[in-house]
Image (spheres, helix red, strand yellow):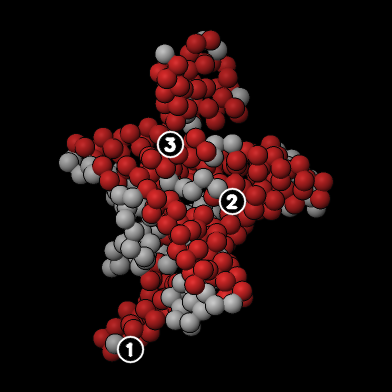
Amino acid sequence: MGLFHTLYDELVGFMGINALLEMYRTGNYQALLTLNGILGAVSPVLPFLLLIEITRALVYKRFKIEDYRMPFLIFVINRVIGRFLSIAAIAFCIGVFEKYAIFKTTFTWYWLIYGYIVWEFGHFLYHYWGHRVRLFWCLHATHHMPQTMNLSVSYAHFFLEGAYADIIRTTVCILLGVNPPLLFFIMFIDGFWGGFIHVGENILKNGRLGFLNKWILTPSHHRVHHAKNPLYMDTNFCNLLNIWDKVFGTFQYEDPKEPIQYGVTRNVNNRNFLDVYFGEFYYLALDVWKAPGILNKIRYIFMPPGWSHTGDHKTAVIVKRAYFESLKNEPSSTTLYETKHEQATN
């Protein structure tokens, strides 16, 4: 019975229906008038969308077990070994840095706007470094391994990535005055939207969300972020507000003429958990071991993915530059080059 009870608890926790079940048991629906009650009622939305997504794939005979198997396996592993790390990281950062905040905010609508802009800045930093620093890419790469896009991808993370991300985001927010209650509310919005933007084409075909595509980060933008096409590499690092991507020149619309190819640029055995979960650490360790001299070994750890001590670099910046140069050098592609280059730099 203990096993079934544990499985039941895990299923209820995954579906996010604890709060709703508690309301049903007690008959106290007044909780829906509180912030915690509202958050509890909203929590099951993404898991139910995932079930709808899978059901639609089954009905239309598009379901492939390999599209979901690895993300769910990763989710199970992370539940066992990493479930408390993010909470501990957040609590640590609040305890250490709150006394150094430049000022204090309150839980009001105008401070919510400020707080979310600050949170997005912290998210941008964590996400940008996750693509531009080899060690941090090892933490983040597991999330980019899936070769299709669906809601299960939002559960595919290396177990230490959440702690790394929350240390950066929480520290930035606390130092810039975002008080803990406001921070936790922002985290809930971010977590919900961050899951939703992984929705697959079974639910949203183009993912542009109409006029919202110009103002916020939509599923279409995040599909671009998960692409390995040279045009799309290292773009759209924000989560909801695209302000910092536009400030730092990393914003990119999805190009209908450039179909998205999901995954990472190296060959990955997506049926092999060890390759998906630990592969990037293995190849980093291999490069460090073979690199001549201590400085080169250190550079492999902190330089962008694709950096090489031989000078034969294959970083995203160089791959993108070569891609645009190839378009520029083809006479028939001059207009295409100008269009794509403008999209990539604006």
In the drawing, does residue 341 fall left or right of residue 106? Answer: left
Q: Amino acid at mark 1?
A: Asn
The reply, left or right, for residue 180 in relation to residue 163 is right
Q: Residue furthest top?
A: 26
Q: In this orientation, which residue lies closer to the viewer: 182 or 228?
A: 228
Q: Quadrant of residue 316?
A: bottom left
Name the mark on residue 165: 2
Q: How many marks?
A: 3
Quarter of the image for residue 47 reads top left
Vertical side of 277 occupied by 330: above or below: below
Between disc 1 and disc 3, whose residue precedes? 3
Residue 131 screen position, x and y as percent: 51, 63
Comes first in the chain, label 3 or label 2: 3
Q: CA distance from mark 3 to mark 2?
A: 20 Å
Image mark for residue 329: 1
Nearer the camera: disc 1 or disc 2: 2
- Residue 291 in the image: x percent, y percent? 52, 74
Gap in Å between the C-alphas at discs 1 and 2? 40 Å
Residue at horizontal 64 percent and vertical 53 percent from the top: 168
In percent of width and height, residue 166 lies at 61, 47
Residue 90: x %, y % from top left: 66, 42
Task: Tell me: 320 left or right of 64.
Answer: right
The kind of secondary structure element at disc 1 is loop
For marks 1 and 2, the one nearer the N-term is 2
Q: Residues within 10 Å of mark 3 (few under 14, many from 20)?
A: some
